Amino acid sequence: MKRRTAREKALQILFSLDSEGYDVQATTEHILDGEESDAFLLAIVKGVVDHKSEIDEKIKSHLEKWSLGRIAAVERTLLRMATYELFYYKDAPESVIINEAIELAHVFGDDKSGKFINGVLSKMMK
């Protein structure tokens, strides 16, 4: 599975977990729908779930005039994924991780999502 696809699937799984509170295993199986899983995908999902409170604190400390609860669920999930990759997984260059999050924001978010994601993640990297 390509990393872009793994990130898309991870976004869908984590979004469902955040929005509906489903079980990780059942949600993963449902989203993959018979498709073979990937170590990278599972690392992102498990990492975000395991480190969610620390990740959320890091995100909160870089938000201006926003609270985590006010951020759209797609953007919040993308920020969590990218923050996990940037600070815990560290298997790709920062620029690649940020760019991937922005690209996913363009696909799954609204017109301003990419710019918002870029702004918050860029602040984290300063």
Image (spheres, rainbow, N blue to C red):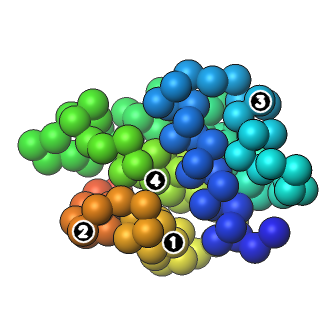
Residue 108 position in % (x across, y down): 43, 61
Q: Is residue 33 above or below residue 20?
A: below
Q: What element does badge 1 sit on?
A: helix
Residue 26 disc label: 3
Structural distance between the alpha carbons of marks 4 and 1: 10 Å
Query: For the point 16% across and 41% down, which residue is it?
Result: 66
The residue type indicated by label 2 comes to Asp
Name the residue tied to disc 2.
111
Query: Who is closer to the viewer here, 51 or 2?
Result: 2
The residue type indicated by label 1 comes to Glu
Query: Who is closer to the viewer here, 110 or 48?
Result: 110
Q: Quadrant of the C terminus?
A: bottom left
Res. 93 visible in picture: yes
Decide if residue 82 is on the left or right side of residue 59: right
Query: For the point 60% across and 60% down, which residue is it?
Result: 8
Dot 2 or dot 1: first in sequence order is: 1
Q: What element does badge 3 sit on?
A: helix
Name the residue tied to disc 1.
100
Residue 78 disc label: 4
Decide if residue 103 is on the left or right side of residue 91: left
Query: For the point 63% across and 61% down, which residue is it?
Result: 7
Is label 4 in contact with label 1 (beta carbons under 8 Å)? no
